[in-house]
Image (cartoon, rainbow, N blue to C red):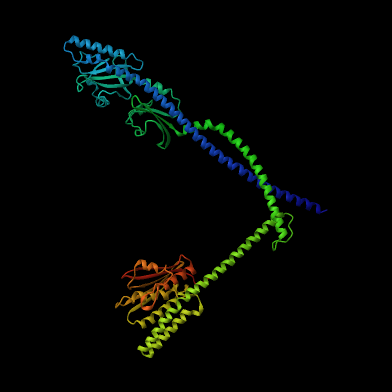
Amino acid sequence: MRSVPRKRRSRAFELWEGFVAARRWMLAYGLLIFLPACIMLFVYYEQSSRILQEEVTQTMKQTLKQTGINLSSRLDYVQNSSNSLFMNHKLYESLDPAHPIIERINQSKELRNLLESVQTAPDIVRARLFTDPNNLYGFDLLNLFPLEELKDRPWREDVLNAGGSVVWTGVYEENYLDAGPARIFSCVRMLRHPRDFDRTLGVLMLDVPEKMVADIVSELDFPAQSRVYIMDRIGTVIYSPERDLIGTRSALASEPDEGILERSDGGVDLFEVLAPIKTADWRLVLEVPKTGLTHRTTALSQWSGIATIAGMTVMFLILVFVLLAFVINGMNRRIKSVVKTIRTEGVEGLEEPRTATGGDFYLLERVVDHLVHRVKDLMEEAYRSKMLEREAELRALQAQINPHFLYNTLDTINWLAISRDADDISHMIESLSDYFRLSLNKGKDYVCLADELELASVYLEIQQKRFPSTFAFFIEAEPEANACLIPKLTLQPIVENALLHGIRKNKGNPGTIRIRAHRNGDELEIAVSDDGIGMEERLAASLLSESRPSERSEGGGSSYGLYNVNERIKLMAGYEYGLAVFSRPGEGTVVTIRLKAATEHLT
């Protein structure tokens, strides 16, 4: 009776595990669908916005260019009217000074009629002529004016420098005697005597109403917060619906006559569209904030983007489920094949029954776990073999250092036996005995710094007996440094080089050898310095890099000693540690040793 509830609980547990596994797969499906869809939506939105922005700006450019063509056409008509008057011989005959008053009155009437006939054109609000009072009899101040009235006009110098060519003024306000104030442009040119070109007869002006330009510009349909203005060749704004802008300098003065620019003004990103007005050598400029253009393009692409993403999402869902079905089916086949192979061929320690909730995946996990541990064991075994190989290499390097000093010392004892009394030989033998006791150190590879310093002291005392009155030595070590362990026979080759190749070669001058040791945090630093002859920097650097000895004079010491010591330290402590040699000719040499500050050697 009790077994039935257990089976039910087991079945419920299996269903719960299946639900948990299915929920993980559902979460994976959601991530596979949602994240790519979001990325695709973002990319689509950015690309469509960029393309629409380009299309909108190109459309604005074409519209602005057409507006510039329309303005040029209207200004061409005014300029052609000015050219007609400029080429009319009656104009010059009427301006030619006449002495009888009746002739001067007739000339004034002819000029007035000629100017009034021109201003009947739709875009010419007034035709005016400014001339010398001696040329005419009286001025009506409607069409005929004295030349002196132009002396305060800002564009007067431009007209004089143009030498008869047309000059277009910017927008300004003119107060007509018969019509009151009006805002106008003017087409201005200077008239010269046809037979005496250096002689000025007057200035001809054809006035164009500002409304003509305003009507053409107002027909443009651009985004909100846009700004349109016209600037001349030097960048001065000569027309704008915002009158406060007229007369200011534009930042686009040096830009091409036509094109689309992007710039930032006061923290606002703008599109600048330029189109030429060729007749007057002006440029029509449209400023559009990017934010307004972006909102406009977003509204245009919103519905098409939603429809496209919805379709892509549905297709992606179908594709994902189809692919997952194939992938899961393939995974099941491969897992069953692996499990079958394991059961058939076997793996040690894995021949045990599966649990009720384990199955093939549990068996596969145990196989992988077994393989991981096996690989780890093989790596540890390889590491131990590598360490044993390194230890053998260290002992081989150390064996190359020991015999050298023994030969020199025995030679010294022999020399002392011949030239001195037996007491000296006895003292020498005692020192040599101490040296061997310290250097052998019961076969240990590491010794404390205090023993190594004592060994260096014994060595230097022996050498003082060999070379009396040639050098003195001093050893200074901090108490906390004395307990640190260093590789055996580290200092002796360095001290030997300092004596034989530094001080002994400085003929006739006694020298000094100093050994200083201190602990700096986790590092032990030892410096061996001498005041001998020194060496070139290139030679000092080669002492640590040359694997073959460069033999020295006097039969002792070589770069072998420093090279071997440096290699031993790097192999034992790491390649960031070792020796450094600093030397200059005539200034002596300093060899610095850097080691880990350890009081117990870990193998």
- The spot of residue 568 in percent (x, y) is 47, 71
- The spot of residue 348 in percent (x, y) is 69, 63
In the picture, measured across the screen, residue 95 lies left or right of residue 453, that is: left
Viewer-side residue, 49 vs 287: 49
* Residue 182 visible somewhere in the drawing: no
Q: Residue at x 67, y 44 (%)?
A: 325
Viewer-side residue, 383 vs 333: 333
Q: Residue furthest left?
A: 99
- Residue 319 placement: quadrant: top right
- The spot of residue 3 in percent (x, y) is 81, 54
Q: Residue at x 65, y 58 (%)?
A: 368
* Residue 59 visible somewhere in the drawing: yes
Q: Is residue 373 above or below residue 193?
A: below
Query: What is the total number of numbered labels drawn onto the structure image?
Result: 0
Viewer-side residue, 263 vs 74: 74
Viewer-side residue, 337 vs 130: 337
Q: Is residue 260 above or below residue 442?
A: above
In the picture, measured across the screen, residue 575 lies left or right of residue 499, that is: right
- Residue 72 placement: quadrant: top left
Quadrant for the C terminus, please.
bottom right
Q: Is residue 224 above or below residue 514?
A: above
Q: Residue furthest top?
A: 102
- The spot of residue 591 in percent (x, y) is 39, 70
